[in-house]
Structure formats: structure tokens, C-alpha cells
Image: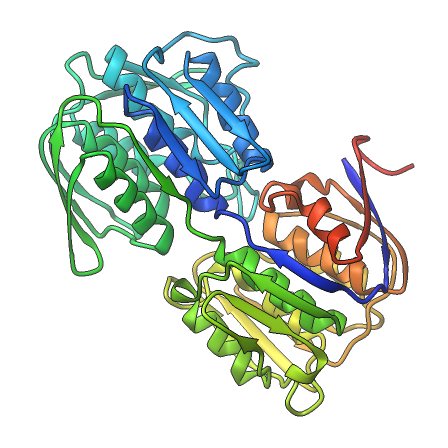
């Protein structure tokens, strides 16, 4: 899949931030814990990752309806059970397959899940992000885990049993697995060294609405009194995507456009927005929207900056590429460090293909950007999800036609990306062929 982008058009208009990818796919997994109907509003129905997860859940017997007009998902999982599927059925290119274990164990005493996929942002087939912490969770809750040729098998004939879970590293995915599994385990569970992001908070709020008994102490200790049975039905709106919000704000700044970005989750992105302000960007805002115009640059240009990506509430690694591309417009040298995923630099080489001159240098954990630079049309490849979107943004800002190969990487994280871009004047055409001729 590749995109043809005719860039250099100044965007104008309104764009609405969709429900967060990193929350919606988790809430969908949690919804499977109920035998009653569950409704998710503000749901990003057109995300590629959502499509993969919905298709797999349907093969297990769940009934899921996606309404693209109302951005709503309706889930009925009463008939869901563990099934031994074909090798092709287990070939699911998403990271969060581990969250599908609890609903199967709840009803069948056994779960069969695909090996986790995801963005190749580091070493190894899973980008340096293994699944050992998830195996630890299942075993801590009394299950046996067997790694088959094409899937992982989690066996707990009497269901998950409450236990003590101690993470050796701070892990979002592991915390999500622990929450979903302990919510339907029998008895009390304690989770230590949990990583509680805004998306994890959304998951906790959702599980509580379904009847789960969850208490949070401080920023990393969670106690769950498991019910040992299905949770109740409910309805809830998915939180807005903080990474998408940052994407549109930065694009508005780089393009010199006039964009109003609606549904901005200010409460979950205070530090990222503070870094924009410290870079000389004074955007207009109300309680839920940001208005970006050329007048937001208080000194006429972006000011150089240094920042380090790490854990929430700071600038998370998924936001790294947007500060890198923003720094290309700065009047001087900027540096972006990433301590959490230091290998997340592959996108820099592709971004450089759409920049006039030599302005980018990347080494493990550090990217140096020498501004100010101009974008140029060209051909580039997608790498990880967010890095791919930065490359797409560069093509949109360049005067002329660009080709972005493997653009499905960007589509994985942005709901109706093509439609939103066209609404504000962007010219993008996505084709299904693997590469452009």
C-alpha cells in the first residue's frame, strides 16, 4: 500500500480528533468480559488495528457492529469461546493480541491467541518488545502457558486465580493484561510497578463501569478484587487521542495553515503542549479546541529546543517524531532524546529523503536536528506508525508530488486519515499496491 501526495497546499478548516487507538483497542478487549451488551462511543471505527482485532474476535464467536456514521461500536460476546483456528487466522499484525486471553479463559478455561505483532521500532521480530511480562502475569494467576508454532496457549481450567503480580519493568501492555485478567480472576490480586498512563486510566474507568472492583494507590500499585465471573454490560466514550491531537497541531504549525483542532484531551498532554509553548508557539485554545495560525509563532519562527522522551506525563516515545519534524522549522539546532525506546530512529533516514540538505543526524537514543530546513518532494518508506506519519506530514508540506510506500503503517494509528486530510485541503490518494511503480 502506498500514498501519492501532492504537497505544498496550505491546510484550512476544522479537524476532529478521534477516539484514542491505544485506548479503543483495549476497551474492545475488556468489553469481551461481559455476557451483556456493551457500547463504546467515540470509537475509531476505521482504524486498521481495530479491523484486525474485530475480525479475530468474530472468529471466536463475538458479535461486533461498527457504525462509522455515529463512531460507535456495539459488542455482544456471550457466544465467544476459545477455538483452535488455522495458521492464517493467527497471523494478526497487531501488538495487543495478549489482551484477548482473559475472555477466552473466562468461558473456556483455555485461550489461544496470536503472537503479538506491532511496530518494528527496535531489534527482533517484535521490535525489541517481548511478551515475557504477559507470560509472567498469566502464570502469576495460576495458568500454564505453552508457546505453539503459530499461537500462544494459556490454560487455566478453573479460571484465573487471584495472585501477586510484580513487573520487573514499567510496562503499559503488561499493566493492561494484568487489569483485564485480574478483573475476572477469583479473589484478590495486587499489581506492583504498574504503568498508569491516561489510556490505562480509561481502561480502569471502563472496567469499573462493568462492575470490577479496582483500587489504585499512588502511581504504580493496583489492587483488584476479582469476581471470578463475567462482568456487566455498560456504555462509555473512548478518550480522545492525545497523539493525534499533537499531530494536527504540529502539522498546522509546519504548513503555515489555519487549523482548528477539536476534541483535544488537554488533561492528558499538559507537558507535551508546554514544550510547544517553550518553542515559541502561542496557540489559541478553549476548553476542547486549539486554533493554529501563522500568528502563533511569537517570534516568526519555531525556537530550537531540547527534550527527552520517556514516561507519561512527559513526552512519550510515540510523540518523538513530531518534535523531530517540528525542529526542522526551528531557527537553530535542536536535540531529541529517547530513553525508553532508543532504537526508534529508523524513520529519520526516510524523513531526510524529503528534506533539502543535510539537517538530520540520528544515533542510538539521540536525534540532532539542524534548522531551519525546507521540505522537498520525493519517495520515502514508512517505518513505525508515528514515524510514518511524520514522513507523510513532510510530503504534505513539500511543493510537489511525493510517494510514501507502506503507508498502511500510518493508517494504523489515524482514524479516517484520508478523509480528514481532504477536508482541510490535503491531496492524498492511497493505493493498495505494495509499492509504487
| Residue located 53% across and 28% down the image | 66
Query: Do we see residue 364 in this rendering?
Result: no
Give the camera-side residue of 125 and 1: 1
- In what quadrant of the picture does the C terminus appear? top right
Up/down of 179 relative to 273, above or below:
above
Snapshot quadrant of residue 78: top left
Snapshot quadrant of residue 298: bottom right
Residue 211: where, in percent of width, then height?
Answer: 18, 34
Up/down of 412 relative to 395, above or below:
above
| Residue located 68% across and 81% down the image | 330
- Name the side, left or right, on which 348 lies relative to 338: right
* Residue found at the far front of this picture: 70
Snapshot quadrant of residue 430: top right
* Residue found at the far left of this picture: 187
Up/down of 386 relative to 10, above or below:
above
| Residue located 50% across and 38% down the image | 126
Give the camera-side residue of 233 and 248: 233
Q: Number of marks in the image?
A: 0
Residue 51: where, in percent of width, then height?
Answer: 56, 28
Give the camera-side residue of 233 and 415: 233
Q: Which color mode does the image show?
A: rainbow
Query: Do we see residue 240 in this rendering?
Result: yes
- Name the side, left or right, on which 120 lies relative to 394: left
Residue 190: where, in percent of width, then height?
Answer: 12, 43
| Residue located 67% across and 92% down the image | 299
- In what quadrant of the picture does the N terminus appear? top right
Give the camera-side residue of 114 and 72: 72
Residue 71: where, in percent of width, then height?
Answer: 53, 38
Amino acid at each position: 500500500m502506498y500514498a501519492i501526495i501532492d504537497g505544498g497546499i496550505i491546510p484550512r478548516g476544522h479537524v476532529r480528533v478521534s477516539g484514542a487507538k491505544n485506548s479503543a483497542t483495549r476497551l474492545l478487549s475488556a468489553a469481551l468480559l461481559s455476557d451483556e451488551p456493551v457500547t463504546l462511543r467515540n470509537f475509531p471505527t476505521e482504524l486498521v488495528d481495530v479491523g484486525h482485532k474485530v475480525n479475530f474476535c468474530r472468529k471466536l464467536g463475538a458479535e461486533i457492529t461498527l457504525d462509522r456514521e455515529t463512531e460507535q461500536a456495539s459488542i455482544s460476546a456471550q457466544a465467544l469461546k476459545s477455538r483452535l483456528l488455522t495458521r492464517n487466522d493467527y497471523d494478526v499484525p497487531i501488538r495487543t493480541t495478549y489482551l484477548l486471553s482473559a475472555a477466552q479463559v473466562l468461558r473456556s478455561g483455555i485461550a489461544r491467541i496470536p503472537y503479538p505483532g506491532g511496530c518494528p521500532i527496535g531489534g527482533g521480530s517484535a521490535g525489541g518488545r517481548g511478551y515475557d511480562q504477559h507470560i509472567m502475569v498469566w502464570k502469576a494467576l495460576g495458568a500454564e502457558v505453552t508457546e505453539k508454532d503459530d499461537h500462544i496457549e494459556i490454560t487455566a481450567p478453573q479460571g484465573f486465580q487471584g495472585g501477586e503480580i510484580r513487573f520487573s519493568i514499567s510496562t503499559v501492555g503488561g499493566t493492561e493484561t494484568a487489569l483485564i485478567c485480574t478483573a475476572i480472576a477469583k479473589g484478590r490480586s495486587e499489581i506492583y510497578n504498574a504503568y498508569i498512563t491516561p489510556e490505562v486510566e480509561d481502561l480502569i474507568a471502563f472496567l469499573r463501569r462493568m462492575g470490577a472492583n479496582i483500587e489504585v494507590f499512588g502511581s504504580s500499585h493496583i489492587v483488584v478484587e476479582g469476581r471470578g465471573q463475567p462482568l456487566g454490560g455498560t456504555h462509555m466514550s473512548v478518550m480522545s487521542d492525545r497523539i493525534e491531537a499533537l499531530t494536527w497541531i504540529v502539522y498546522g504549525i509546519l504548513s503555515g495553515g489555519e487549523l482548528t483542532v477539536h476534541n483535544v484531551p488537554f488533561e492528558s498532554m499538559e507537558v507535551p503542549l508546554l514544550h510547544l509553548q517553550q518553542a515559541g508557539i502561542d496557540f489559541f485554545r478553549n476548553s476542547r479546541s486549539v486554533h493554529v495560525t501563522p500568528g502563533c509563532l511569537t517570534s516568526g519562527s519555531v525556537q530550537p529546543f531540547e527534550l527527552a522522551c520517556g514516561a507519561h506525563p512527559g513526552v512519550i516515545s510515540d510523540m518523538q517524531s513530531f518534535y523531530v519534524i517540528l525542529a526542522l522549522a526551528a531557527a537553530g539546532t535542536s536535540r531529541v532524546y529517547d530513553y525508553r525506546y532508543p532504537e526508534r530512529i529508523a524513520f529519520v533516514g526516510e524523513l531526510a529523503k524529503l528534506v533539502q540538505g543535510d539537517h538530520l543526524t540520528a544515533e542510538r537514543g539521540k536525534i540532532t536536528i539542524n534548522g531551519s530546513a525546507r521540505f522537498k518532494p520525493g519517495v520515502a518508506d514508512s517505518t513505525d506508525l508515528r514515524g510514518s506519519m511524520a514522513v507523510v506530514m513532510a510530503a504534505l508540506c513539500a511543493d510537489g508530488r511525493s510517494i510514501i510506500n507502506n503507508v498502511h503503517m500510518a493508517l494504523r494509528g489515524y482514524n479516517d486519515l484520508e478523509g480528514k486530510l481532504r477536508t482541510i485541503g490535503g491531496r492524498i490518494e492511497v493505493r493498495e499496491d505494495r509499492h509504487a511503480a
